[in-house]
């Protein structure tokens, strides 16, 4: 019988996922030499090499590649057992790993942390910001308990709970205030500022502007909504913002906000978790709290946008 510890399994899983001792050690919050020792002890226990080491990277051996999915299944099952025990205790408590996409996290996460601390005093909220593809992968591999993102995700293993809807608002240089609002057909002819690839908000903006995944020279990219708004303020182009971001991103920027004509672009924000999660009933409670917070912040941002556009 193999004598492997859960700690060794988690270390090996990190190494298999990241393919690098340094990054795996950082992910596990231990030193690289300590991680290497644990992997060697694991290899001694199983009687064969699990990884092929080189100066720059590691590769899984045939044995390691066969081990990796089974180790991941074991870790997922152990996590589910922990969730099952927590769900039987009543109110949600203990650590909750919550992912949030970057176009929501800066604007909603502070309120979520504050209100969850009041509503669920035993809860230890552990937020993580990442793009949708990364969050979905982490949910499926049980590295996250739930995530807040734009819907739909369309992953059969995940449950999607809608939280709130919000519109997109056109942000343009202040010198364009009072000018006619361009149609969706006209936006592709303008210098459009978008987030980098990997952000779902970029894909939503491209879809509204009827631009393909390679939109051409009229599009410039930024790493954050803050960068895009500052570029608009400098007169470089125009961009779209979700309503929830308006109070933060337009507070110090000299820009003009314009409501786009129907059909107005927008998105549905939801909370997503594994259908198999024993924490489902408690996560519905958290989702209800976040839905109230999100709707309130959206409505406040909508009033701001209406006040600036005069519509």
Image: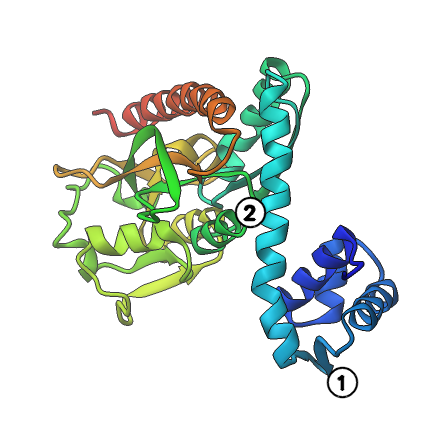
Secondary element at tag 1: loop
Residue 201, how many percent across, how many down?
Answer: 35, 49
Question: Where does the N terminus fall, quadrant-wise?
Answer: bottom right
* Distance of label 2 from label 1 (alpha carbons): 31 Å
Mark 1 surroundings: few (<14), some (14-19) or many (≥20) residues within 10 A: few
Q: Can you give x and y, in whole percent of width and height, for residue 208 in the image?
A: 20, 50
Query: What residue appears at the point 44 percent right and 43 percent down from the top-left corner?
Result: 103
Residue 143 lies, with reference to residue 54, above or below; the image says above
Rendered residue at 38%/37% (across/down): 159
The location of residue 97, given as percent across then percent down, is 60, 38
| For residue 152, above or below residue 94 | below
Report which residue position mark 1 lands on. 55
Q: Which mark is residue 142?
A: 2
One can see residue 126 in this view: no
Q: Quadrant of the C terminus?
A: top left
Would residue 271 be found to the left or right of residue 216 on screen? Answer: right
Work out whether mark 2 precedes mark 1 in sequence or the reverse, and give the earlier one. 1
Judge by depth and name the residue closer to the eye, 300 or 143. Answer: 143
Examine the rendering and report whether any part of residue 146 can be seen.
yes
Q: Is residue 83 left or right of residue 36?
A: left
- Mark 2 or 1: in front is 2
- Residue 8, percent across and down? 77, 58
Q: Are marks 2 and 1 in contact (CB under 8 Å)?
A: no
Residue 213, image quadrant: bottom left
The crowding category of the residue bearing disc 2, from other C-alpha atoms within 10 Å (few below 14, some 14 to 19, many at least 20), is many
Residue at 71%, 65% in the rendered image: 23
Vertical side of 141 occupied by 282: above or below: above
Direction from residue 251 to residue 39 in the image, left or right: right
Residue in the picture at 38% in, 34% down: 270
SS at badge 2: loop
> In this view, which residue lies farthest toward the front?
1
Looking at the picture, tell me which residue is in the foreground, 278 or 135.
Answer: 278
């Amino acid at each position: 019988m193999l004598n492997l510890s859960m700690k060794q399994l988690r270390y090996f899983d990190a190494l298999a996922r990241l393919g690098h001792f340094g990054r795996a050690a950082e992910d596990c919050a231990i030193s690289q030499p300590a991680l290497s020792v644990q992997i060697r002890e694991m290899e001694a226990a199983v009687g064969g090499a699990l990884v092929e080491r080189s100066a720059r990277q590691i590769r899984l051996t045939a044995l390691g590649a066969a081990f990796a999915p089974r180790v991941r299944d074991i870790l997922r099952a152990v996590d589910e057992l922990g969730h099952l025990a927590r769900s039987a205790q009543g109110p949600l408590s203990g650590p909750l790993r919550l992912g949030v996409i970057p176009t929501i996290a800066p604007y909603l996460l502070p309120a979520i942390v504050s209100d969850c601390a009041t509503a669920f005093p035993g809860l230890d909220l552990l937020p993580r910001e990442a793009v949708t593809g990364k969050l979905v992968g982490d949910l499926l591999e049980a590295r996250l308990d739930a995530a807040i993102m734009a819907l739909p995700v369309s992953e059969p293993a995940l449950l999607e709970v809608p939280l709130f809807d919000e519109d997109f608002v056109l942000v343009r240089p202040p010198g364009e205030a009072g000018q006619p609002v361009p149609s969706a057909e006209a936006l592709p002819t303008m210098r459009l500022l978008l987030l980098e690839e990997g952000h779902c908000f970029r894909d939503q903006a491209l879809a509204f502007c009827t631009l393909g995944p390679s939109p051409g020279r009229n599009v410039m990219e930024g790493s954050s909504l803050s960068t895009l708004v500052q570029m608009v303020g400098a007169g470089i182009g125009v961009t779209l913002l979700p309503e929830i971001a308006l109070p933060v991103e337009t507070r110090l920027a000299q820009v003009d906000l314009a409501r786009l004509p129907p059909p107005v672009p927008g998105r549905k924000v939801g909370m997503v978790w594994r259908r198999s999660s024993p924490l489902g009933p408690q996560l519905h409670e958290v989702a209800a709290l976040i839905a109230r917070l999100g709707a309130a912040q959206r409505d406040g941002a909508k009033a701001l946008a209406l006040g600036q556009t005069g519509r």
